[in-house]
Image: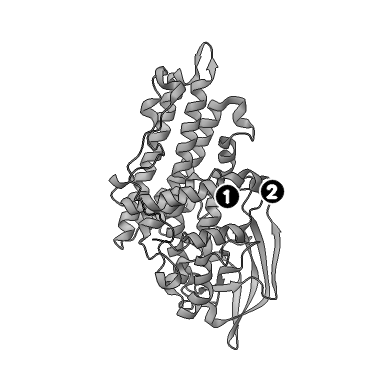
Amino acid sequence: MATIIGTTVLRRTTRNLRPLSRLLSTETHLKIKLEPYELTHETIFNEDHAELRASLNKFIQKEINPFVDEWENAKSFPAHELFKKIGSAGFFGVNKPTKYGGLGLDYSFSVAMAEELGSITCGAIPMAIGVQADMATPALMRFGSEELKKQFLVPTIAGDFVACLGVSEPGAGSDVASIKTVAVKKGDDYVINGSKLWITNGLQADWICLLVNTSEGPAHKNKSLICVPLNLPGVQKARNINKLGMHSSDTAELFFEDVKVPQSYRIGKEGMGFTYQMMQFVDERVFAGASVLLSMERLINDTAAYCAQRKAFGKSILDNQYVHFRLAELQTEVELLRSLVYRTTALYLEGKDVNKLASMLKLKAGRLVREVPDSCLQFWGGMGFTSDVEVSRAYRDNRLLSIGGGADEVMLSIICKYMGTFPKDQTLF
């Protein structure tokens, strides 16, 4: 951990993760004090986790947050430049083996990193980082050949490559089994034809972890994951999709026309791609839930501070019982989500099947990240409807979480499958 962590072990963070006890008295309104939070009292964290988070927070405050407004306005960020800095600091290989340039830590450190990424003052950059760290690479790490790891994983961990994940298509989003992109064997190669949509990092990416049909068998057994360089003949990066939120993250539509790649670029066994991708979705959903915790708490804190100084009808807005009670309710919901994230992580570390819990926390996170900025924006009044405050950006950005990585309805269906209440005459996966 020497590459990213200083010599002094951080025992306490200065972030206020449970602030509302100080907000209910008018005597403290004008001087809201942040209480230190002891990360190490959590069952899945210790002093090393706290130190990693402190190092990442320092990086964020220096290399990311000062430029967020500029990148949001430009609707793009310099992925290669930023990702090289992140890779050099060690944050792309937190739970990857040291032989590939990683830190060799367990999965709880990836969750700690994901949570700290919530310190970034937009949703787009944490999402882009998450794709590189925990969405496009888990299957490659678990099932890829040594040669494939050297060619794609090592430079991705180092930040020399920008990676993306190619699952969704114009006619297949949450219904992964319905994808149409095909890879046909020709000699020692695959010839790929098809298209992918909603590809985060797609315009700047060097390679894509691509889910394709490699046979005409059953939909859940005919797919494979292939590492595809995006500079090959036949690859077309068609457009940067204009989105409601997540402005600084490029979102591409990609076309593949007779793209040849060696069969050795396939990850693991042919026909196992659907299973591998379902496993990657677990990592993605836990990451998503962890990454929004601090941003929601920041909105609650900022809203409390704003309402403490804003007067209406002769008193502080925060003095209205509905306002401070509502903020207390929201903070409670955030803590419940955090507990579910941590419990899922603990069971994941034990090798348990956490698909149900990961789906639950993704469902809860997607709904809560809409509820928190919606409620907080109301308390900001007209100011909340401007682009001058973070709450309006969060209101736009957070709507994606109930769609991307599996829509809420898919999460509910997965949960129902585990509960035994999903209709037997219907197919999900």
Question: Which coloring applies here?
Answer: one colour
Q: Which label was assigned to residue 321?
A: none
Residue at figure coordinates x 50%, y 31% from the top left: 302
Circle 2 residues within 10 Å: few <14, some 14–19, many ≥20: few
Amino acid type at mark 1: Ala
Q: Residue at x 35, y 47 (%)?
A: 10
Q: Is residue 90 above or below residue 15?
A: below
Could you say which is closer to the camera, residue 140 or residue 98? Answer: 98
User: Does any portion of residue 201 appear in the rendered image?
Assistant: no
Which sits in the foreground, 115 or 419? 115
Kindly indicate the quadrant of the structure image that contains residue 228: bottom right
Q: Is there any visible trace of residue 85 in the rendered image?
A: yes
Query: Which residue is farthest front?
Result: 7
> For residue 335, which quarter of the picture?
top left
Q: Name the kind of residue labelled 2 in the image.
A: Ala
Q: Quadrant of the N terminus?
A: bottom left
Residue 166 screen position, x and y as percent: 57, 65
**Relative image position of residue 209 (x, y in whole percent):** 54, 68
Q: Which mark is residue 124?
A: 1
Q: Are marks 2 and 1 in contact (CB under 8 Å)?
A: no
Whole-angstrom CA distance, mark 2 to mark 1, is 13 Å
Residue nearer the viewer, 71 or 145:
71
According to the picture, the residue beneath numbered tag 2 turns out to be: 74
Question: Who comes first in sequence, dot 2 or dot 1?
Answer: 2
Q: Position of residue 168 (x, y in %)?
A: 58, 61
Q: Measured along the vertical axis of the image, is residue 45 above or below residue 214? A: above
Q: Secondary structure at mark 2?
A: helix
Instruction: Determine crowd level at label 1: few under 14, some 14-19, many 20+ residues with C-alpha closer than 10 A.
Output: many
- Residue shown at 53% from the left, 76% from the top: 151
How many numbered dots are placed on residues in this image?
2
